[in-house]
Image (cartoon, grey):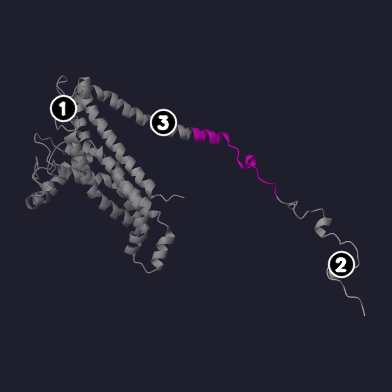
Amino acid sequence: MSDPIATGSPASTGDPGRRAGLPAPRSAASEAGISRSAPPSNSPPPVTPATSRGVVQRGDRLFSGLATGSGTFVVVLIGLIGLFLLLQAIPALLHDHANFLTSRQFETDDPNALRFGILELLEVTVEVSVYALVLAMPVGLGIALFLTQYAPARVAKPFAYLVDLLAAVPSIIFGLWGILVLAPVIRPIAVWLNAHFGWIWLFAHGNVGPELGSNLFIAGIVLAAMLLPIITAISREVFERTPTAQIEGALALGATKWEVIQTTVLPFGRAGYVSASMLGLGRALGETIALTVILSASNQAFSGSLFDGGATFASKIALSFAELNNALSAGAYIAAGLVLFILTFAVNAAARWIVNRGVPQS
């Protein structure tokens, strides 16, 4: 009877060398000189921060400097324009015998008795611009949706080109068209609105009346036509970039064309559409020649009606600045221009803020 093998002895292992009392053979990895803890010899060396950075070429440095310099130049230029307006306006503001912010007078003939304020100019400018924006926004949205979602390519491209071509029409042409062509055609509508809705301050008789075409009612329609290229072009570009996967997913779930627009196109392009409208508003605030041709001055105060006449910041400066022959009287108009500069800058900054809010943060 053979002796039992003790548990835990070399003979109890499955290695014949150990059962024979011989040393265990080295593994193939040990024979090859490779440690179990060491990485393989063919693995790439660790990347240090010095080798991970690329070499900056001379052209990259040159382009970066030009881009930074261009951006800095624009910012400095805007600041210098604002500083120039402020320095030129301060002497006139110090000699102003009326409240600059609340007065409706604008008398600058006598430099020793300046009485000017911006309240009426601000009211006319804001009302005609907002009125034009209200008219242009839905029309621009409809054109942009038609060109991107409904019209075939052979129709969309030439139609979009025609709409963009409106931006090339000079302002004086829009003004002459509005006062000579549009006003006689639109006069019956203006009279009807005044007759049936005259109890509303917006359609009251005003200081010019609905019979004449030189009022805010006609000026706002002309200004809306001038805003259409801006609103339509930007909105069209935004709507075209709606992710195709979202559109196809909505269609796959059985959505109609209008439901696709409601659930995918409009939510995706809302920020771009609103920012385009705000940029159009900034354009409307500074419009000069067209409103100078259409709007007529009035001795009566501005009442807020669309059938009022008056002057905006830009039209007032264009009509009167060439006749000024002293620094104080010119400074009064420069002060009005400073307010317009700040107002337009604030509107464009608001448009940029809306765009940044609509961009998803990564």
Residue 235 appears in the rendering: no
Discs 3/2, front: 2
Q: Per the image, is 54 magenta? A: yes
- In magenta, the rendered stretch is 44-65
Q: Give, as a three-letter code, the residue at label 3.
A: Phe
For mark 2, give the secondary structure. helix
Q: Which residue is mark 3?
A: 73
Q: Per the image, is 30 magenta? A: no
Quarter of the picture holding the N terminus: bottom right
Task: Please name whichever residue, 1 or 280, is drawn nearer the observer in this view of the structure.
Answer: 1
Residue 310 as seen in the image, left or right of residue 143: left
Q: Which residue is mark 2?
A: 10
Q: Give, as a three-letter code, the residue at label 2.
A: Pro
* Marks 3 and 2, how far apart at CA: 86 Å
Name the residue at 50% across, 35% down: 64
In this view, 241 is above or below 125:
below
Q: Which numbered disc flags the more N-terminal residue, 3 or 2?
A: 2
Name the residue at 14% across, 37% down: 310
Residue 358 appears in the rendering: yes
Q: Which residue is mark 1?
A: 98
Residue 351 point in image, percent of width and height: 33, 44
Q: Give, as a three-letter code, the residue at label 1.
A: Ala
Q: Which numbered disc flags the more N-terminal residue, 3 or 1?
A: 3
Residue 176 point in image, percent of width and height: 19, 40
* Marks 3 and 1, how far apart at CA: 38 Å
For mark 1, give the secondary structure. loop
Residue 59 point in image, percent of width and height: 55, 35
